[in-house]
């Protein structure tokens, strides 16, 4: 756990440093060339820098152990940070579109296109390296904040490449067709960048809200939990009220377990320990809470029958036997 926390902190610091360098470079070259697409990229990288700082804060605080005020831990800080990052991205995209439309209405000549293309190429290469590193650590540690940061940088790779292509087309048109101006390519490229940013922000918002609203685990994870419970059918008569949720890299699983009524407390405790350990082996970070109930066949409710592992014949037989 300590090693994972150290890895997360290290890659986030790396992301902050790389984004800081790119923001300065893009801002300087954007002002030098007068390109709205490069300036939009500087804003994009600025948002990425802010996102990396938020992720750094989230990673540092989500790793804190549970306390009296937060008995379930602090993992949802990462989900909140992901939502905040998405809102910032939406705002940046709106500004880019606004400035691009102004440039479409009133085009302006661009200068030093070579510098612009060089910086965009450098940005793409740096972001490819950093995003791959972030994705690797983010998936390994199941950190939403780090994966969100990686998504931002991966999107930067494509947007920087798009801006570089747009600048290249403008340079090519000026070289081949003297007197003809294709400055409209620059704001069009900026708008495309903004649309891609909005798509990334939407996906990030959806994932953050999904976890904040305590949505259940994936179908595969729930299926594994069910299979694991049913593997002990001779000792377990059924289960119900299975509820799951996720917070950061932690999963919370709880359900009621029906056992034969003559099972001792020690036996039932041993059984829940075995089931818990098996679930945690397959689903790392799982917090399992099992409530034991004696199986009373003469009082089978609809919810009990739905999760009953006994056949109707066996259920009727045990009802008649009173066991």
Image: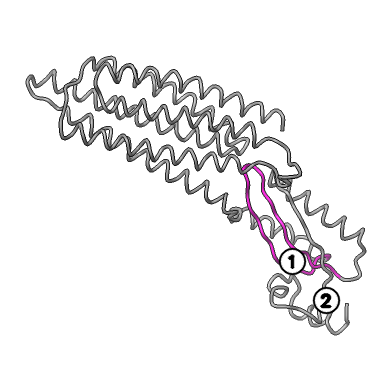
**Mark 1 crowdedness (10 Å alpha carbons): few <14, some 14-19, many ≥20:** many
216 vs 92, left or right, is right
Task: Point out the image quarter for the N terminus.
Answer: top right
| Residue 97 to residue 205: above or below | above
27 vs 104, left or right, is right
Looking at the image, the residue that sits furthest to the front is 69
Alpha carbons under labels 2 and 1: distance apart: 13 Å
| Residue 162 to residue 205: above or below | above
Residue 240 forms part of the magenta stretch: yes
Which mark is on residue 239?
1
Q: Which secondary structure is most common in the magenta stretch?
A: strand
**Mark 2 crowdedness (10 Å alpha carbons): few <14, some 14-19, many ≥20:** some
Of the residues under marks 2 and 1, which one precedes in the sequence?
Answer: 1
Task: Point out the image quarter for the C terminus.
Answer: bottom right
Instruction: Name the foreground residue: 242 vs 232.
Output: 242
Name the residue tied to disc 2: 296
| Highlighted magenta segment, given as a residue range | 235-260
Residue 68 forms part of the magenta stretch: no
Q: Which color mode does the image show?
A: one colour
x then y, percent, for residue 204: 47, 43
């Amino acid at each position: 756990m300590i090693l994972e926390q150290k890895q997360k902190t290290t890659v986030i610091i790396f992301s902050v440093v790389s984004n800081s360098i790119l923001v300065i470079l893009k801002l300087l070259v954007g002002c030098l060339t007068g390109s709205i697409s490069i300036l939009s990229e500087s804003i994009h990288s600025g948002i990425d820098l802010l996102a990396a700082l938020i992720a750094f804060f989230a990673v540092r605080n989500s790793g804190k152990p549970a306390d009296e005020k937060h008995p379930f831990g602090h993992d949802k800080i990462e989900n909140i940070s992901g939502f905040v990052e998405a809102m910032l991205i939406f705002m940046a995209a709106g500004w880019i579109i606004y400035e691009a439309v102004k440039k479409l209405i009133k085009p302006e000549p661009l200068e030093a296109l070579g510098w612009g293309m060089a910086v965009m190429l450098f940005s793409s290469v740096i972001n490819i390296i950093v995003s791959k590193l972030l994705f690797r650590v983010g998936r390994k540690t199941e950190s939403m904040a780090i994966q969100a940061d990686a998504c931002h940088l991966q999107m930067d790779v494509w947007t920087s490449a798009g801006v570089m292509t747009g600048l290249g087309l403008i340079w090519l048109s000026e070289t081949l067709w003297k007197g003809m101006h294709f400055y409209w390519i620059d704001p069009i490229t900026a708008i495309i960048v903004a649309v891609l940013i909005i798509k990334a922000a939407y996906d990030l918002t959806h994932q953050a809200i999904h976890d904040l609203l305590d949505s259940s685990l994936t179908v595969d994870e729930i299926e594994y939990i069910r299979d694991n419970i049913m593997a002990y059918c001779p000792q377990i008569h059924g289960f119900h009220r299975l509820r799951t949720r996720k917070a950061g890299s932690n999963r919370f699983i709880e359900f009621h377990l029906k056992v034969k009524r003559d099972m001792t407390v020690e036996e039932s405790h041993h059984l829940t320990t075995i089931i818990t350990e098996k679930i945690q082996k397959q689903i790392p970070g799982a917090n399992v809470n099992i409530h034991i109930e004696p199986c009373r066949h003469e009082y089978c409710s609809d919810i009990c029958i739905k999760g009953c592992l006994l056949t109707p014949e066996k259920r009727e037989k045990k009802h008649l036997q009173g066991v």
